[in-house]
Amino acid sequence: MRAQDPNLVWTVLDCDGQPSIASGFHVVNRLGYLIASVPVAPDHTYNVACEDLTEPDDDPGGAV
């Protein structure tokens, strides 16, 4: 992993149960890495919060 250009690496994170994706190498709360084909500018850092897009189950009993 260290052979990758750090400006191409994004880290998938879990921060208190909230998933997010951040540019660069991160170790704490890391779930995995993504490798981009377009680099991030060296003087920029990005952090993208991911929303839970699942709809709540209206029938917790699971009746059909």
Image (cartoon, rainbow, N blue to C red):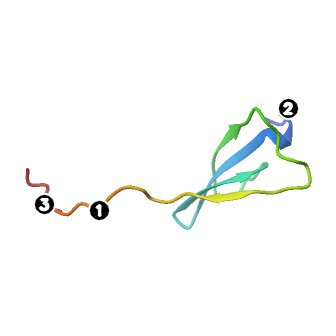
Q: Quadrant of residue 40?
A: top right
Judging by the rendered image, the residue that carries numbered circle 1 is 56
Residue 26 placement (x, y as % from top left):
75, 53
Which of marks 2 and 1 precedes in the sequence? 2
Q: Residue at x 29, y 62 (%)?
A: 56
What amino acid type is highlighted by mark number 1? Pro
Q: Quadrant of residue 6?
A: top right
- CA neighbours of label 2 inside 10 A, class few (<14), some (14 to 19), many (20+): few
Image-based side of 18 in relation to 1, left or right: left
What amino acid type is highlighted by mark number 2? Ala
Quarter of the figure with the N terminus: top right
Judging by the rendered image, the residue that carries numbered circle 3 is 61
Element at label 3: loop
Real-space Cα separation, disc 3 to disc 2, in angstroms? 50 Å
Real-space Cα separation, disc 1 to disc 3, in angstroms? 13 Å
What amino acid type is highlighted by mark number 3? Gly
Task: Give the foreground label among 1 and 3.
Answer: 1
